[in-house]
């Protein structure tokens, strides 16, 4: 019942984080607006800048108008000056142009913004030109009058006795020189000859009128000529030039100001744009963090789930295992074996899922170590041999000679991938063989690429199936799931693992003709040379004769190559008959007899040999079957050495040598700790709250002839440690009252790790979790569900 | 969140633009000076000599002109609705009223002879003393003069707005309806249309030698010879410069009561200075001079000869000149 409430801590943190996100989602609108302060500020600044821009624009407009007006006015004044001076010329008959210019200038004057600075000068100018025009136009009338008089005098020369003529001549002289002296002369002459001149009235000229015109000219001609100079020298044009320049400068200044403002507005808009981009980026980051957290949660969930499943599974497998060791009838044994198999399958699936999620969340680390190639293959063989032999498949290992004995790499993961491929091959092959081949693909200075290939004679795959084979949860055919089982994760995990190890994985296949899966990995040579290099091949074997009875041609070939490699002289026999004949013709030092042969078995040959006595010196049985199967058949025969197919070079070599030395062959069962003399003195405390696991682990330990005490939680364990003397503690982590971590910390206050080793027993096999156990002072950990071998290995290790 | 953010951005942008817009509208300068531009266009013909013929109107906005004519004849422009512009400027009778000085509201009389409105567009300044440079500027003068129309713009605009007919016309041709500018523009346009083309002198100037009688041609000869033409020249035969009355000889007392342009500039040298009036239609604009003290053209010519030319003109001279001056008259061309 308690599986899901085992994580009060986790549940707590989850609810807390949920609360936190809820808070983030519904903050008050006030603070939400405040978090957009850069945008708000930008908008505020934009408003200010906009207003300033409007002002700047207006200023520029009016500056432009002012400049134009000033320029126009300057132009008009200069034109007006010219037109005004022209009034004095006789050729200028009307003053419309001058009047028009004056009108335009007046109109323009009204538009000037800063009149006061030039008002005085403009008034002065106006006065001077008006005065000039008035006098100049009147002078024209007077001159015309004098001109008329001159004509008149010329017509009546005799009548005036030269006085009038003289006056006219004097006037001409005055007009050309404009001299005050001459003017005085004219005045003097007129006053002196007044009576004489008055006579002209008699001939139709009015003297007093002529006199007035002469006086007008005398009074004003000099004035007008002076006015010409005055008008030209007036400061107004120069002032206007400066004025225009100033206006132009103001205009360009205001233009610059406007451009600056516009630039600032654009910069502001750009800033807003940048804000948008930054927010988007943040948003993206946020959502990716969310996604990451979700993935984290998923993998946490998977870890928890697998833990929860592992605990009861441990019970199932353990109890089934224990059950098998009791006396059972055949039917019961079959049931229990199937139960055990199902449990183990379930465990594989869980491991696969966990691996996959670990790889996906990048929590899986590749740990390269030096490893023995033969050992790697041997482990695979151990795992798969039984399955293969049950199906009657030939499992053949070929390690080419250029592969060194030791390599540097993550043997666990390589083994996992290889095992996966091999078990797939075995699963999908009904008859024939599975060949596992290892060769060097590319040689490098430090790392070489090694190619592991698994070739089968199974159902094969179509090219289309090959394509999607390595993607998640896919099997070549969805119907295969029903037929062959499995999660469909194996190949994707293999792919991910090979990629993690910088390798590649692939498949070559033809439907119904079998497939070849392979993966290539760059692996370095072992860093530390093997210190206990065994002499190979052993001198004792060279030149010895060997008879091989084997029906499978590939196995025969491989075995022959291996034997040749060891220096043995091989004679091949494919049937019992051939073997019997060969042995009757020649004495062999060694015989390698395949047990399972078509229609007959190796036992027949052995019986024959025992009967005739013409048998080779050393006979080794060579089988893919569980030794237990044929052991009954061996009844009545001598004890023979048995080696399991598939054979590896070193195994074969050792088998021959052991035969020489007369030692017993090793089997899987033998690895389990056997009762020894000092076993009684080894006391183990099992701290475990789960009743089923208490039974499973307890029974397994008792099986190893150990003295086992059981504590239900950390607190009880502490008491028991005080009153008893234990050699080893198996500690569950999650327990009520006091958990394993706390208990370990307490125990470590009194005992160090060598005095009292503590092994964590946990279903939690994630790396960072196990690291935590070691941190609190535990010596090792054992993942649930554990198998007996693993348990015994640990016990052996600490038993010293 | 993103959608709301963008909507917020858009709103912020719009809000700040709105503020700027409001500011821009609030601070927009309403131009207080009356700037009136009419688009009347004339075509001038240049001829040899001091006198120039009147131009042809090649474009005038008739809607504004007609409105201007109506306003010109409307007594609504005076404070007591008793007189109109046309009361003193009879367009069909020389453009003035024939009195020495005009009669305004409440029978008040002014100090100066009303000048003709005919061809006034070609005068370089308006009024006898040139206190206005343009027709547009001139318009508000008589309206505000307490002894002329005695009104003000506010009153005039209100009255025009209340007059259904005027209001409708204003609304139809001016987007802002009745405004000071519109009134001024209408009257100005109308005044610009008052061009008396086709006078005998203009026909003569344009090459028709038979347009002037023999006596008139003699008069033209004397007009030039005696120097009248020094001041009375150009398109308007005068109207393009200021001149002092009595430049050569002292003016009679009847003409020296008015200080003329001195009233505008307060400059000593502007005493007795007046705008040289246009002689166009001079035969129809008696009485003469700034205060209308001289009732006949004959007298006026005589006085001018004496004061400005320094000549005692003979009777024959005066008659010849008078005959010539008759050739300056023509009627307003109807558009």
Image: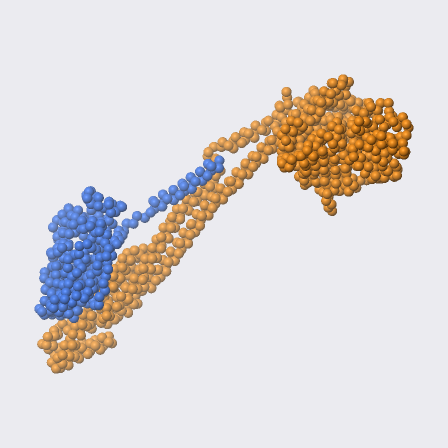
Chain colours: A orange, B blue
Residue B202 drawn at (x, y percent): 17, 63
Residue drawn at x 16%, y 51% as measured from the top left:
B85
Q: Does residue A595 appear anywhere in the picture?
A: yes
Q: Does residue B147 appear anywhere in the picture?
A: no
Between A351 and A604, the residue placed more toward the observer is A604
Residue drawn at x 73%, y 30% as measured from the top left:
A431
Residue A687 drawn at (x, y percent): 71, 23
Between A742 and A316, the residue placed more toward the observer is A316
Answer with the quarter of the image where residue A418 lies.
top right
Answer with the quarter of the image where residue A493 lies.
top right
Residue drawn at x 30%, y 64% as measured from the top left:
A78
- The quarter of the rendered structure image containing the N terminus of chain A is top right
Residue drawn at x 15%, y 48% as measured from the top left:
B75
Describe residue A311's horizontal placement relative to residue A556 as left or right.
left
Between B186 and B327, the residue placed more toward the observer is B327
Q: Is residue A78 above or below residue A411?
A: below
Q: How many marks?
A: 0
Residue B142 drawn at (x, y percent): 18, 52
Residue A197 drawn at (x, y percent): 13, 77
Between B177 and A643, the residue placed more toward the observer is A643
């Amino acid at each position: 019942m308690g599986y899901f409430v085992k994580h009060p801590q986790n549940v707590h943190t989850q609810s807390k984080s949920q609360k936190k996100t809820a808070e983030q989602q519904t903050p008050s609108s006030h603070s939400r607006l405040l978090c957009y302060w850069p945008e708000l500020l930008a908008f505020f600044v934009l408003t200010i800048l906009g207003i300033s821009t409007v002002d700047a624009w207006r200023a520029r407009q009016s500056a432009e108008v002012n400049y134009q007006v000033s320029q126009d006015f300057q132009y008009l004044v200069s034109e007006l000056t010219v037109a005004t001076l022209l009034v004095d010329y006789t050729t200028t008959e009307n003053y419309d142009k001058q009047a028009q210019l004056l009108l335009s200038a007046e109109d323009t004057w009204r538009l000037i913004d800063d009149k006061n600075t030039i008002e005085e000068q403009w008034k002065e100018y106006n006065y001077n030109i008006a005065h000039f025009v008035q006098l100049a136009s009147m002078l024209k009338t007077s001159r015309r009058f004098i001109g008329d008089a001159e004509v008149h005098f010329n017509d009546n020369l005799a009548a005036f006795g030269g006085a009038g003529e003289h006056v006219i001549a004097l006037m001409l002289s005055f007009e050309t020189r404009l001299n005050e002296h001459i003017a005085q002369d004219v005045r003097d002459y007129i006053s002196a000859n007044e009576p004489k001149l008055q006579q002209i009235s008699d001939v139709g000229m009015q003297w007093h009128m002529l006199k007035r015109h002469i006086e007008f000219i005398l009074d004003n001609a000099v004035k007008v000529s002076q006015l010409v100079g005055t008008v030209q020298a007036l400061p107004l044009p120069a002032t206007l030039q400066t004025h225009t320049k100033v206006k132009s400068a103001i205009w360009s200044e205001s233009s610059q100001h406007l451009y600056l403002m516009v630039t600032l507005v654009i910069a502001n808009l750009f800033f807003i744009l940048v804000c948008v981009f930054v927010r988007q980026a943040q948003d993206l980051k946020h959502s990716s963090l969310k996604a990451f957290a979700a993935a984290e949660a998923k993998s946490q969930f998977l870890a928890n789930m697998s833990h929860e499943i592992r605990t009861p599974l441990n019970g199932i497998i353990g109890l089934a295992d224990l059950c098998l060791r009791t006396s059972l009838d055949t039917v019961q044994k079959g049931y229990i074996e199937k139960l055990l198999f199902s449990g183990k399958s379930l465990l594989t699936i869980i491991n696969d899922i966990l691996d996959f999620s670990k790889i996906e969340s990048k929590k899986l680390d590749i740990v390269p170590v030096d490893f023995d190639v033969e050992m790697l293959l041997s482990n695979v063989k151990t795992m798969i041999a039984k399955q293969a032999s049950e199906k009657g498949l030939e499992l053949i290992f070929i390690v080419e000679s250029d592969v060194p004995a030791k390599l540097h790499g993550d043997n666990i993961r390589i083994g996992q991938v290889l095992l996966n491929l091999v078990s797939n091959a075995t699963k999908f092959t009904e008859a024939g063989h599975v060949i596992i081949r290892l060769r060097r693909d590319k040689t490098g200075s430090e790392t070489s690429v090694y190619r592991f290939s698994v070739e089968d004679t199974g159902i094969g795959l179509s090219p289309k199936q090959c394509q999607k084979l390595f993607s998640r949860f896919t099997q070549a055919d969805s119907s295969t799931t029903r037929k062959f089982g499995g999660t469909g994760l194996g190949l994707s995990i293999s792919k991910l693992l090979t990629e993690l190890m910088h390798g590649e994985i692939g498949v070559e296949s033809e439907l119904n003709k079998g497939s070849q899966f392979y993966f290539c990995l760059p692996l370095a040579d072992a860093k530390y040379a093997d210190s206990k290099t065994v002499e190979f091949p052993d001198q004792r074997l060279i030149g010895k004769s060997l008879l091989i009875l084997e029906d499978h041609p590939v196995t025969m070939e491989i075995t022959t190559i291996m034997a040749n490699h060891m220096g043995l002289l091989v004679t091949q026999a494919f049937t019992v008959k051939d073997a019997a004949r060969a042995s009757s013709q020649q004495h062999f030092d060694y015989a390698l007899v395949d047990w399972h042969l078509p229609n007959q078995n190796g036992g027949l040959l052995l019986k024959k040999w025992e009967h005739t006595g013409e048998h080779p010196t050393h006979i080794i049985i060579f089988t893919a079957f569980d030794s237990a199967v044929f052991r009954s058949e061996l009844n009545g025969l001598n004890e023979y050495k048995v080696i399991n197919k598939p054979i590896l070079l070193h195994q074969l070599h050792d088998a021959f040598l052991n035969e020489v030395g007369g030692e017993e062959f090793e089997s899987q069962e033998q690895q389990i700790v056997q009762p020894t003399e000092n076993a009684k003195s080894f006391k183990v405390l099992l701290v475990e709250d789960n009743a089923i696991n208490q039974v499973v682990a307890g029974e397994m330990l008792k099986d190893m002839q150990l003295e086992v005490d059981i504590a239900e939680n950390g607190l009880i364990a502490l008491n028991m440690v005080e009153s008893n003397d234990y050699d080893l503690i198996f500690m569950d982590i999650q327990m009520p009252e006091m958990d394993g971590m706390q208990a370990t910390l307490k125990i470590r206050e009194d005992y160090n790790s060598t005095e009292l080793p503590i092994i964590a027993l946990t279903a939690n096999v994630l790396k960072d979790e196990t690291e935590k156990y070691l941190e609190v002072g535990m010596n090792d950990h054992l993942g649930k569900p554990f198998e007996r071998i693993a348990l015994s290995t640990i016990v052996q290790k600490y038993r010293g | 969140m993103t959608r709301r953010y963008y909507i917020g951005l858009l709103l912020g942008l719009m809000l700040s633009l709105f503020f700027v817009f409001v500011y821009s509208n609030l601070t927009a300068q309403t131009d207080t000076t009356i700037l009136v531009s009419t688009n009347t266009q004339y075509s001038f013909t240049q001829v040899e000599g001091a006198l120039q013929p009147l131009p042809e109107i090649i474009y005038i906005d008739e809607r504004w002109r007609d409105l201007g004519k109506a306003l010109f004849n409307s007594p609504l422009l005076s404070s007591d609705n008793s007189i109109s512009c046309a009361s003193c400027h009879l367009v069909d009778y020389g453009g003035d009223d024939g009195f020495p000085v005009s009669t305004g509201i409440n029978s008040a009389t002014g100090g100066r002879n009303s000048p003709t409105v005919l061809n006034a567009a070609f005068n370089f300044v308006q009024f006898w003393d040139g206190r206005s440079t343009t027709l547009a500027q001139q318009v508000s003068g008589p309206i505000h003069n307490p002894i002329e129309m005695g009104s003000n713009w506010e009153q005039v605009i209100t009255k025009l707005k209340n007059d259904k007919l005027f209001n409708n016309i204003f609304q139809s041709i001016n987007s802002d309806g009745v405004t000071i500018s519109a009134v001024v523009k209408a009257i100005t346009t109308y005044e610009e249309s008052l061009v008396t083309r086709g006078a005998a002198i203009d026909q003569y100037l344009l090459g028709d030698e038979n347009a002037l009688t023999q006596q008139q041609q003699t008069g033209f000869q004397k007009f030039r010879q005696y120097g009248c033409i020094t001041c009375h020249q150009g398109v308007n035969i005068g109207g393009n410069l200021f001149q002092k009355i009595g430049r050569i000889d002292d003016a009679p007392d009847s003409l020296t009561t008015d200080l003329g342009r001195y009233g505008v500039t307060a400059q000593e040298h502007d005493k007795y200075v007046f705008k040289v009036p246009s002689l166009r239609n001079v035969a129809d604009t008696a009485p003469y001079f700034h205060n209308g003290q001289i009732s006949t053209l004959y007298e006026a010519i005589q006085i001018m000869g004496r004061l400005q030319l320094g000549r005692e003109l003979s009777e024959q001279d005066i008659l010849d000149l008078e005959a010539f001056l008759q050739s300056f008259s023509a009627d307003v061309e109807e558009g």
